[in-house]
């Protein structure tokens, strides 16, 4: 099955309001171009050093999303062009993105990453940390950032009910923030949940954005 046919199949399965982020990490520019030529425009990368040459060589109407753990010292390299950072997991990173976006005279969309999995090595704010940040109005001090929603990665497990419960908990929190702290904010509308192995469950539980790699591009090269 070709990349084009996989994308078409996925898009036919997704509700209209759900954005497909084609995660192209570890795959060559030729594979991305194949997806691009099918009409797809939203791609995700998780390493700055891999994203930069792809940005340079590939069409400029691609909407690049950063989906991996982002180090503060790498923000300056992607700030001129990145559309959305899915993995904002600290106030220090928020501050750096805001600073570099300001230098570029642009606003960058971000998703606050929430730690919902049992694995300790996964990054993200706790629910309590986000609530405390919002109560202190700390996000108001970042004029060059648009808080577009939340992101979460479920536990890597075959237990679909565990995954479902983690996604459901995140969606409940997302809805509470949407009607509470972000009431009247048109930008706060994205819930990035679900990858190749668990996206159908994520869709059931309210995801608006899925990050799909291997189902489109095959196994990593």
Image (cartoon, rainbow, N blue to C red):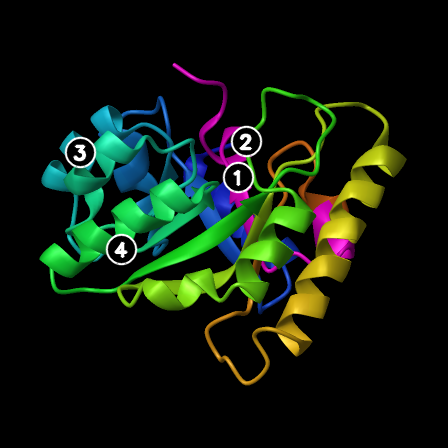
Q: Which mark is residue 212?
A: 1
Q: Residues within 10 Å of mark 1 (few under 14, many from 20)?
A: many
The mark that comes first in sequence, 1 or 3, is: 3
Disc 2, SS: loop
Badge 1 vs badge 2, beta-carbon distance below 8 Å: no
Q: Is residue 214 magenta?
A: yes
Could you say where residue 105 lies in the image, as x and y percent from the top left?
12, 64
Q: Residue at x 58, y 65 (%)?
A: 135
Could you say where residue 9 lies in the image, as x and y percent from the top left?
58, 48
Residue 207 in the image: above or below residue 75: below
Q: Which mark is residue 123?
A: 2
The answer for how far apart the CA atoms under marks 2 and 4 are is 20 Å
* Side (left or right) of 61 relative to 38: left
Q: Residue at x 55, y 33 (%)?
A: 215
Q: Which residues are magenta?
A: 202-221
The mark that comes first in sequence, 1 or 2, is: 2
Residue depth check, mark 2 versus mark 3: number of the one nearer the observer: 2
Residue depth check, mark 3 versus mark 4: number of the one nearer the observer: 4
Residue furthest to the bottom in view is 184
The mark that comes first in sequence, 2 or 3, is: 3
The answer for how far apart the CA atoms under marks 1 and 3 are is 20 Å
Residue 47 in the image: above or below residue 20: above
* Side (left or right) of 178 relative to 118: left
Could you say where residue 35 lies in the image, as x and y percent from the top left?
35, 43
The mark that comes first in sequence, 2 or 4, is: 4
Q: Which mark is residue 52?
A: 3
Q: In which image quadrant can residue 197 be found?
A: top right
Badge 1 vs badge 3, beta-carbon distance below 8 Å: no
Q: Quadrant of the C terminus?
A: top left
Quick check: can you spot residue 43? no
């Amino acid at each position: 099955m070709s990349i084009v046919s996989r994308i078409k199949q996925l898009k036919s399965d997704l509700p209209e309001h759900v954005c497909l982020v084609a995660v192209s990490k570890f795959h060559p520019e030729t594979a991305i171009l194949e997806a691009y030529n099918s009409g797809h425009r939203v791609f995700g990368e998780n390493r700055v050093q891999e994203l930069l040459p792809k940005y340079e060589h590939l069409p400029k109407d691609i909407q690049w999303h950063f989906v991996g753990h982002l180090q503060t010292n790498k923000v300056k390299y992607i700030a001129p062009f990145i559309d959305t950072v899915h993995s904002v997991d600290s106030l220090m990173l928020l501050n750096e993105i805001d600073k570099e976006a300001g230098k570029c005279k642009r606003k960058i969309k971000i998703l606050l990453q929430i730690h919902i999995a049992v694995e300790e090595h996964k990054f993200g704010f706790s629910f309590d940390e986000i609530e405390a940040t919002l109560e202190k109005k700390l996000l108001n001090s970042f004029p060059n950032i648009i808080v577009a929603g939340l992101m979460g990665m479920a536990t890597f497990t075959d237990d679909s009910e565990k995954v479902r419960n983690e996604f459901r908990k995140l969606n409940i929190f997302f809805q509470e923030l949407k009607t509470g702290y972000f009431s009247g904010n048109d930008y706060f509308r994205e819930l990035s949940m679900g990858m190749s192995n668990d996206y159908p469950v994520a869709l059931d539980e309210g995801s608006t954005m899925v990050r799909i790699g291997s189902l489109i591009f095959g196994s990593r090269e």
